[in-house]
Structures are given as C-alpha cells and as structure tokens.
Image: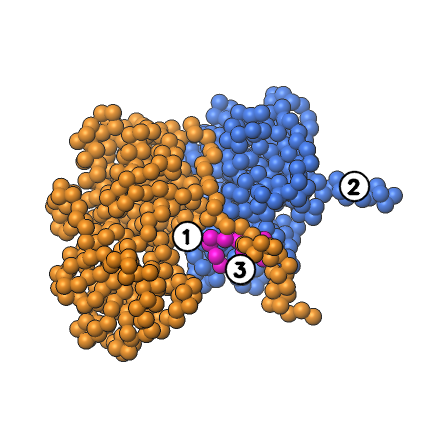
Chain colours: A blue, B orange
Amino acid sequence: MISVWIVAAALAATPPVYHLWESFHTTDGLPSEKAFCVAVDRDRVWVGTDRGLACREEGVWRTYREAEGLAHNAVLSVAVDPATRELWAGTMGGLSRLSAGRFTTFTQFDSGLPNDVVFGVAIENQNVWVATTVGQGRYMVREGRWQVYTPENSPQHEPWGYAVDYADGKVWAALWGGGVLEFDPATEKWKDHIDPDREMEIDLFRDDGLIHMITTAVSYRAGILWAATYFGLSSYDGYRWRGYMDHDTGLASNFINSVKAKGRQAWLCTDKGLSVVDYGSNRWVTYAPRDDPSNYMGPWVARNYSEGELLNTVALEAGLANNFVLGVDFHGEDVWVATAKGVSRGRLGGAKSRKGISP
Amino acid sequence: MISGPLFLSVLMAINVPASGQPYRDLSLSDTRFLGPSDSDVAPDGHETIRIGVLGPARSAAGDRLQAAVEIAIEEANRRGGCKGRPYEMVFRSDDGLWGTGAKQLAALALEDSVSAIVGGLNGGDAHVAELATAKLWVPLITPTASDMTIDYANVPWVFRIFPRDDLQARSLIDYGGERGLRRLLVLIEGNREGRTGRRRLEQAADRAGFGLWGIEEYEAHEMYETKSAAVRDADALLIWGEPTGALELIRSARADSFDGPVLLAANTLGPELISARESLGELIVAAPYDLGRRWPTELERAFRSRTGSPPDPVGIFTYDATRMIIEAIDSAGPSRTAIRSALAEGVHSGLAGTYRFDGLGGASMAPVLCTHRKGRWSRIPTSKVR
C-alpha cells in the first residue's frame, strides 16, 4: 500500500509529457505570427499579437484591431476577469477593456493609467493591475478610480514594471531593475524581494534570493513564487529561495520571457523552447528542437530531467510553432503556448487530427 | 533559535561553491537572438531605408544627436545609399515624463518602420527604450548612456558603445588614490544618472580601499552657496552630472577660490566645456576619447554649421553609432534581424575607436583620462596613471 502511494506521489510530482502538439498561424486566422501572450477563458482562447488581438471560440479565430476599438494593435498582455468575463488587454497604446462586445480604452491622457505602454495586466478581485514603464497601476473598477505606485510610494528601486500577477490574496510585480514586489491588498502594504548580492555581473550564491534584479515575469500559485529573468529562474516558498539555471537543471535556456505556474509546477517560456518544472521533485520536461535550438522546423523532442540529469528523450511527432516562446496558459489539461511564430496547443492525449478540435 | 541574518549567513555558507567563485558569472552570458530570422519583414513600403532617432527635442543634446545622424546619413547617401536606396532619419522625441520613450520607440518600430534606432542618451532613457525593444525586436544603439546595467538587462537587441560608468568611476577613484586626494568631495546631480554614478563611485572606492571624504547631491542651477562650505574644506572635487550644472559648479568653485583638482565623469562633457578657453584650473576627466585629438575637417565643419559648436561626445558617438548601423545595412540588408547580427558579430571602426560587442551587447571602450590646462585638453600619459 505504501509503495503504491510512493509511486503515485512520484508520478504526481513528475510533469507529464505532452505528446500531441498542434499549431495555428495566420493561415488559420491569427492576425500575426508573433504572439506575445495567451489567456484562456473557459471555451475562449485569447491571443495578443503585434497586429491585433485574436480570440478562438468554437474552433474559429476572430481578430480585434484598432478599427474595432482596441487601444493599439500591439497587444502585450491579456487577462480575463473570472467573475465578469471582461477581457483586459495591455497594449502599446493603452489599456483596453472588452465588455459586452465593446471596447473601452484607458490612456495616460484620459485616465489614471500610469503609461500607455502596458507590459502586464492582472485581475485582483474587482481591481485591474497594470505594469508600465512608470510604475504599477491599480484600477478600481467599481469606483472608477486609479491608484499609481511608483518609487515615491512603494519600495521600487526602479519604476519599470514588466509583469504583474495576482493569486491567493497577493499581487506580485516583476520590475525591470527592481526585483519582485509583493502587495497585500488587505493591508495595502508593499514588500520588495531583491537580489541579495546586489551585483548585476554575478549570481554569488545559487539559493540566496533572486538571481537578478531585472525580472521579466512573475507567477504565484500554491504558495510558491516564481520569478523569471534573462539569466535564469528563481522560486520562493516563503522560507527558502532556489535558483535554477540551464547548466544544472532541465531548464531549456536562462533567457526566460515568461513564467506561469499551475499548482506546484511552473511553465517557463524561453528562447530555446518550453520547460516545465515540478517544485517538489525538481523534475523537468523541456520541449525543444532536437538539434539546433533555433531550428524550430524540428524534429522536436521532450527531454525529461531530474535536477540536471537527463533521464530520457522522447521524440515528438510535431513540436511547437517556434522555439522562441513568449507566453503560456492552461485549459484543463491542455496547454496553450504563444510563440514568435504562431500559437500552439499541447495535449496529453486525444485525436491527432486538427479537425474538430475546440475551442 | 537562529536569528534571521544568522540563518541567512548559515544558508549562504552552505552554498558557497568549493571553488570560491560566484555561482555564476553573468558577464560570460552570450545571448544570441534565437527567434525566427524571418519574423521581421524588412521594413519596406518606403522608398528610403529609415533609421530611427529617439532623444530629446528640447535640448542642446537632442540637437547634436539629430545633427550627427543627419551628417552620417548624408555621407552615406552621397555614396549612393544602400544599393541606390537612400537613407532617411525619422526622429521621435522622448521628452516628457519617464516612460515616454517606450511609446515613441513603439511608434518608430511599428508605425515608422525603421530598420534600427539610435537613441536613449542616458541610462534611464536607454532602459525605457530597452523595455520596448525587448518586445519589438528592433536594433537599438545607445550612443552616450554609460549605465552598465544596460548590458545586464541582457536584451539581444540593445547595444551600448559609451565607456561604462563603473570603468569611469574606477579610473577617477584610482587617479584620486594615486594623487593622495584624501579629502575628495563627490558632487552628484540629484537625478537617476547622478545616483547611479554615486553607486559606481562607492563601489570603486570600496574596491580600491579609498575613503570618499564627502558626497553631496546638487541640482542644476542650484545656488552654489549651499555647497560652498563643503567645497572649501575639500582637497579635490569629483563631479558626476549633466554638462550645464557641472560647468556652473566648476566656475562657481573657482570663483570661490577653490584651487584643487576637479575630477569629472564623462557625462559632464558638453560643447562648452570641451571648447573652453578660459582657465578652469586643473580638470581631470574620465573622457570617452582623447579630448586633445582633432576630427576630420569636413565632419567638424558640418557639425559646427548645424549646431554652432564642435563635436562633443554626443555628436561623435552618435555619428559612430549611425555609421555602424549603415554599414550593417549595407552588408546585411535592411532586415532588423540581419542588422542585429551584423552589429553583434562585427568589428566596427569608428572615430572614437574600434567597437566590438561582448555577449551582452556592450562595447569594450575604456575611458581615457584627460586634463585641461591653459585652455587645452590633453591626454594624461599612462605612465602618470598606474
């Protein structure tokens, strides 16, 4: 009985391999090949590209652009309010809300939006958070009021917000040059997490704190904070920091564009493919081109690692749309991936044909 | 019960690598761009090949930035452009509150379809541009930002060519140590650049075991009297700030009978200081090049006719940056990915020196210590600077 439990626990701690990948391109209805981000809302998949916002519903892609009221065609971030299903899109020309089929746009000139270039957006209860080049903004939707957080009123070493996330009662912000900020809406208090060695050129100790002060993304789930940088990954469970780099883990690359956690596993979007790590077991699965990391035409493989040791390599019939991965989100067991050359969906099983697949 | 700091110390001790080396030397990172090389359609639809310029519209530095780009482009167009296709400058201003540059960079990349961008004159502006560049994938050369953290953002599209601030700080602190300037008063401008410079100076002083006697912030056009007492007690001054405020400080200190040496960071160098013929006492600057050298007559004439002043570091480094981009386009075509590769992998000969970019996109230019005596700048011989 105990051995069964141990085996089950080990299996649960090992990220499964997604064998089935399908990809979507402009030929399928995407407005652009370059997809910055993806967000799943029940049966809808939202994709922000450099030429518009795309929505896949019932197997059909639809595009929203400036002509439809979108603030700007370059959509860097998207978030869906789980309560209202309103979509919030951070663009290079303001923040857009899509509600009841109509866009409302917020800019720095007609609202309290800190800056028109909105790198990150997240929903916190009835509030919407944005990460911009001059700080973090919190739009209190019910009150129609903005709060702006800059180095003047929060512990930001630099004001440049790059990503924001909300989960389990805390807001987390990734700052370009300022590490990670934590905000507790209950107390309205901020706390900063910085690289303890304060050195840009080195990471002095592996597990002493954030790898680097310039963070590109942050995600918090199941009590674990994940912070991405262009030099590696850090995690923090409230007691212990851990650092992860490609030379001693299964991480595809230290150049991490984005991170999104699901339970105790984190998905890492890198320039050399997609990795997923389980916090407890430090087991990894990395999806990447088999040979040249930038040869996205493949063949693709899934590599299983324990810590940094390669356990096995699984050949994939099809890989992701591109090795340069920019965003990820989940739809049940499925995973949706935004890449520099299309959008991909990974599945654990099911039909191999693309036809009849929804959403 | 182990206290927090003690616990941290124990934890860190456990993780000390046996080699005594840091866990990772990030300067050894070699970031290539691994995105699809055909993702960027070579900006076309225009008869010209466009080079974007991002900088201040309402400042003398902005004028010199634009003038230098124009001169380099005109030279290239006289040679026939790129296979007969002329180059064109597209300027967008990053004046305004912090963050303006990100939106303007997006406009240059997405609306103006530029092939590459020159801009971000200081560390803050360069970082703001860098944030957007990381998303939009357009090559950016910052001509005069010295902030070393630009390199350590590790964005494969951003290139820095001005001597790094930490190297400037080291050369000035080492010089001060050699001279035995024990009462060195550091005056930093009260902005991001100044505060960044302060950190670099403190780090350099720690490294050299050199005690900084005093550090004070100043604002441009601030009444000198607020600093007068501290200045009078000092052996030497070290100024880190914009040209206008720095020159005011020097003149005020000299008028106040301060006759010690004044050490200067490279960002203090504006046209007025470079061409100063008045006696400003002993000045030592961590210059980006030998300030005593002369520039090609035609360039000097073109620059003077546009700006009314001789080329300064903004002009020289912007001219070099623009020429680098033009040469990259001439050899690789107007595709942004190809330009990035040509910049990253090439060796580029410029007026200020030869530029080679390391894996983080920084050029290995070292500052040159120069001194100003009797209205002339000259290089301090290496033998006098250990």
Q: Where is residue A263 in the image (x, y as percent from the top left)?
A: 66, 46
* SS category of the residue bearing label 3: loop
Mark 3 and mark 2 residues within 8 Å of each other at the beta carbon? no
- Estimate the x, y position of residue B215 in percent, counting from the top left: 35, 70
Q: Quadrant of residue B216?
A: bottom left
Residue on which the image places disc 1:
B149
> Residue at label 2?
A8
Q: Where is residue A48 in the image (x, y as percent from the top left)?
A: 48, 37
Badge 1 local density, few (<14 within 10 Å), some, or many (20+)? many
* Magenta residues (range): A196-212
Same chain shared by disc 1 and disc 2: no
Question: Label 1: chain?
Answer: B
Q: Which residue is drawn at 31% across and 39% down?
A: B348
* Residue A326 x, y percent position in the rendering: 51, 38
Instruction: Look at the numbered discs 1 and 2 and tell me whether their residues touch, using CB distance below 8 Å.
Output: no
Amino acid type for the residue under numbered disc 2: Ala
Task: Say which of B231 and A143 sits in front.
Answer: B231
Q: For residue B159, which quarter of the picture?
A: top left
- Residue behind mark 3: A196
Secondary structure at badge 1 equals helix
Q: Looking at the rendering, in which quadrant would you find the N terminus of chain A? A: top right
Instruction: Give the number of marks.
Output: 3
Query: Is residue A211 highlighted in magenta?
Result: yes
